[in-house]
Image (cartoon, grey):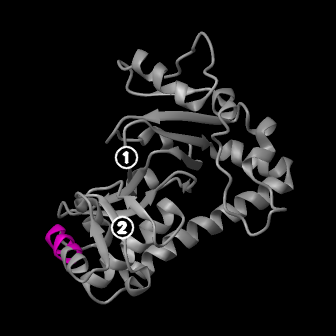
Amino acid sequence: MSIVFGAEPERLEDLDDWVALTRRHEMYAVSAAQIRSANAIPRPHTGSSADPDLLDFTPELDGAVAFTRWRREENCAALLTEGGLCWVLSGIIRKSVVHESGQRRIVDLIMPGDFFALGSDDAASYSFEAVTEGTLTARLTQRNLIKLAKDDPRLYRLFYQLACDVIARLESQLLVQGRTTATEKIAAYLLLMSTRLSGAEDGAVVLPVSRYDIADHLGIAVETVSRAMTELRRAGLIKLNGPRRIAMTAPRKLT
């Protein structure tokens, strides 16, 4: 469902005011002009400053990109209708699978600036939910994605780089899960989250997910997550200021 506003907000923050007026709707779309005016389209991390980014293609993307804001724990099944390319502007999207036993495994936590592809089989294999209230996503359908790439080789180059970024993100998570002990897994996971959230390994961060999510992301029990964090705190490697606020006091020793 699209909501047509009487006037476009000047900044992305202004959209929160519009949210309050449209609470009765489960989902709403905002225009590309609203996002563009807020400079909200993220710049993907490419290898060179000469590489193109999405802001270089604002005229081409205007009208082709669908923006949607999601409520906390809302199923984002609408993203899967036509496949294509998505990215998160704010909030977090959780990609997970539930086994026949009922056990959930989180495949990916998609954060602001992260891109993810949607395949034809994803609807049957995975579920996508918004972790935080007001999560905002952008999507290019597969049809528009192919057309834009054909029309402009620079966009094809950009899409290729984005695919490489997705693979690199998932490879980093695989390396974390490959650690031997549970404490090593948690240490590496916290280090990775700190880097993704603050851009530095020694940053103090507020974990955007619960310990249950961490457990399902690493494939271990939530009790094991709690014990490992306590062990790291007692060893002086991290400081816990509440259940989610964590400071890395000795990041090199967490590697």
**Quarter of the rendering occupied by the C terminus:** bottom left
Task: Answer above or below: position of 34 versus 219.
Answer: above
Tell which circle, 1 or 2, labels the residue nearer the N-terminal end. Answer: 1
x then y, percent, for residue 139: 59, 42
Q: Which mark is residue 247?
A: 2
Mark 1 vs mark 2, foreground winner is: 2
Residue 199 vs residue 186: left or right? right
Q: Is residue 67 above or below residue 132?
A: above
Per the image, label 2 sits on a secondary structure element best described as strand
Q: Which residues are magenta?
A: 222-229
Task: Kindly identify which numbered label has been placed on residue 160.
Answer: none
Residue 109 placed where, x, y %?
42, 59
Asked whether residue 217 is in view, the answer is yes
Q: In the image, what residue occupies the spot 48% across and 54% down?
A: 111
Mark 1 to mark 2 CA distance (whole Å): 27 Å
Question: According to the image, label 1 marks what residue?
Answer: 129
**Type of amino acid under label 1:** Glu
Q: Amino acid under label 2?
A: Ala
Q: Residue at x 25, y 67 (%)?
A: 215
Task: Locate residue 15, reporting x and y percent.
Answer: 52, 26
The image shows a total of numbered marks equal to 2
In the rendered image of this protein, does residue 216 appear above or below residue 65?
below
Magenta span dominant secondary structure: helix
Q: Residues within 10 Å of mark 2 (few under 14, many from 20)?
A: many
